[in-house]
Image: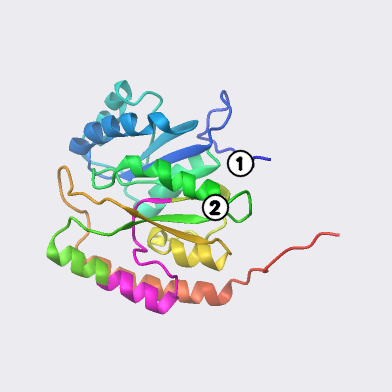
């Protein structure tokens, strides 16, 4: 039996829910929107019933206008906007809460991720069967197309998280992930949570599937965060996740009589 996601105030009630929702959080990506949406339209032709939800996190350029205009290449594109910048994790949660799919796939909106990878990631998740909680599929970037300093900072952060949290994932901050919506909504919300999903999902009993994906150079623009910002915030957040795990007790199984 298919689980039915709970409704959000942003969710239309006129159509049956799709199997999959693809969620992208964007901030000042106006130049990238159209080529990314055009590539999505081509890559998603083979997907089962799905929807695409973009969340604009308070952009100050023409990102929203570009998203609305991109509906001619990606019909049915849903656009949700924050009135101010709240952070990537908050934007992803907004999109996931607004989504209607049983499964959620997250992807960046700067062109570095290949949307064609979502279909095999979903196939791996569905092969795991109907067990709850469902698996977390992480698109592990084997070859990064970033600056040397960015690659070094990411490798350091991933290694630190893996050693301290023992999450078993070589690329915890990977933007491409796929999971059940209901499983995600059980997790605590804080800015930066998207970098700790392997540890948090694992704590709630979700099996981890690491799937190698292609990584590409940005189409236009630059990252919104410096390496120093990422490092300082990452160390603090890792300590916070360790505390959360120590204070969150989850039963191994449930019995109803």
Q: Is residue 57 visible?
A: no
Q: Residue furthest top?
A: 72
- Magenta stretch containing residue 175, yes or no? yes
Q: Quadrant of the C terminus?
A: bottom right
Q: Is residue 254 visible?
A: yes
Question: Magenta span covers which residues?
Answer: 156-177
Label 2 packing within 10 angstroms: few (<14), some (14-19), many (20+):
few
Whether residues under marks 1 and 2 lie with C-beta atoms below 8 angstroms apart, the answer is yes
Q: Position of residue 196 (x, y in %)?
A: 42, 64
Residue on which disc 1 sits: 6
Q: Is residue 224 above or below residue 75?
A: below
Q: Residue furthest front?
A: 127
Residue on which disc 2 sits: 185
Give the quarter of the image for residue 58: top left
The residue sitting at 31% across, 27% down in the picture is 68
Q: Position of residue 110 (x, y in %)?
A: 24, 44
Element carrying mark 1: loop
């Amino acid at each position: 039996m298919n689980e039915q996601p709970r409704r959000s105030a942003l969710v239309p009630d006129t159509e049956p829910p799709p199997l999959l929702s693809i969620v992208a959080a964007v901030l000042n990506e106006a130049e990238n929107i159209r080529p990314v949406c055009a590539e999505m339209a081509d890559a998603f032709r083979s997907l089962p019933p799905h929807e695409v939800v973009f969340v604009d996190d308070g952009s100050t350029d023409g990102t929203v206008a570009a998203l609305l205009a991109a509906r001619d290449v990606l019909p049915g594109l849903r656009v949700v906007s924050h009135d101010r910048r709240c952070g990537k994790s908050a934007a992803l949660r907004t999109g996931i809460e607004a989504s209607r799919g049983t499964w959620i796939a997250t992807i960046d909106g700067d062109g570095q991720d290949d949307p064609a990878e979502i279909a095999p990631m979903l196939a791996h998740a569905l092969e795991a069967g109907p067990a709850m909680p469902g698996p977390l599929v992480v698109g592990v970037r084997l070859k990064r197309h970033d600056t040397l300093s960015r690659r070094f900072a990411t490798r350091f952060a991933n290694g630190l998280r893996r050693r301290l949290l023992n999450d078993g994932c070589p690329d915890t901050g990977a933007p491409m992930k796929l999971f059940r919506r209901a499983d995600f909504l059980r997790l605590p919300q804080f800015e930066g949570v998207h970098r700790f999903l392997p540890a948090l999902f694992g704590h709630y009993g979700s099996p981890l599937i690491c799937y190698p994906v292609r990584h590409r150079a940005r189409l236009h623009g630059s990252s919104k965060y410096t390496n120093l910002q990422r490092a300082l915030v990452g160390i603090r957040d890792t300590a916070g996740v360790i505390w959360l795990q120590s204070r969150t007790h989850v039963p191994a199984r449930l019995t109803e009589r």
